[in-house]
């Protein structure tokens, strides 16, 4: 992930940056979380689903 974003070589990541700085970069990287899609079901739809 860091190599793709910064275009650094694997050698530079392994030997040119301290582990602490690399961990801070990963912690500060923007993240994305998926929200659960919830749908509301009306009473008539629920009755149809339950076969009532």
Image (cartoon, helix red, strand yellow):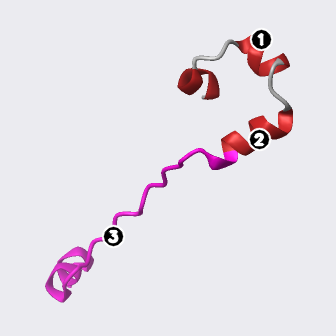
Q: How would you classify the magenta stretch by its main secondary structure?
A: loop
C-alpha distance separating marks 2 and 1: 17 Å
Residues under numbered marks 3 and 1 in contact, where contact means CB atoms less than 8 Å apart: no
The magenta stretch spans residue 45? yes
Mark 3 lies on residue: 38
State which quarter of the image contains the N terminus.
Answer: top right
Residues under numbered marks 2 and 1 in contact, where contact means CB atoms less than 8 Å apart: no
Using the image, determine if residue 37 lies above or below residue 10.
Answer: below
Question: For the residue carrying disc 3, how many other residues have a C-alpha within 10 Å: few (<14), some (14-19), or many (20+)?
Answer: few
Of residue 39 and residue 12, the one placed in the foreground of this image is: 12
Of residue 34 and residue 22, the one placed in the foreground of this image is: 22
Instruction: Write down the quadrant of residue 51 in the picture.
Output: bottom left
Say which label, 3 or 1, has the lower sequence index: 1
Q: Where in the figure is residue 47, as x and y percent of width and height?
A: 20, 84
C-alpha distance separating marks 3 and 1: 46 Å
* Magenta part of the chain: 27-52
Which mark is nearer the camera, 2 or 3? 2
Q: Is residue 8 left or right of residue 34?
A: right
Of residue 47 and residue 21, the one placed in the foreground of this image is: 21
Say which label, 2 or 1, has the lower sequence index: 1
Q: Is residue 16 left or right of residue 9?
A: right
Mark 2 lies on residue: 23
Mark 1 lies on residue: 11
The magenta stretch spans residue 47? yes
Using the image, determine if residue 16 lies above or below residue 40.
Answer: above
Instruction: Write down the quadrant of residue 6 in the picture.
Output: top right
How many marks the image carries: the answer is: 3
Question: For the residue carrying disc 2, how many other residues have a C-alpha within 10 Å: few (<14), some (14-19), or many (20+)?
Answer: few
- The residue sitting at 84% across, 40% down in the picture is 20
Say which label, 2 or 3, has the lower sequence index: 2
């Amino acid at each position: 992930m860091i190599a793709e974003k910064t275009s650094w070589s694997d050698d530079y990541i392994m030997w040119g940056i301290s582990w602490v700085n690399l961990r801070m970069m990963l912690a500060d990287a923007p993240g994305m979380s998926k929200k659960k899609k919830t749908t509301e079901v009306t009473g008539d739809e629920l009755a149809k689903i339950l076969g009532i």
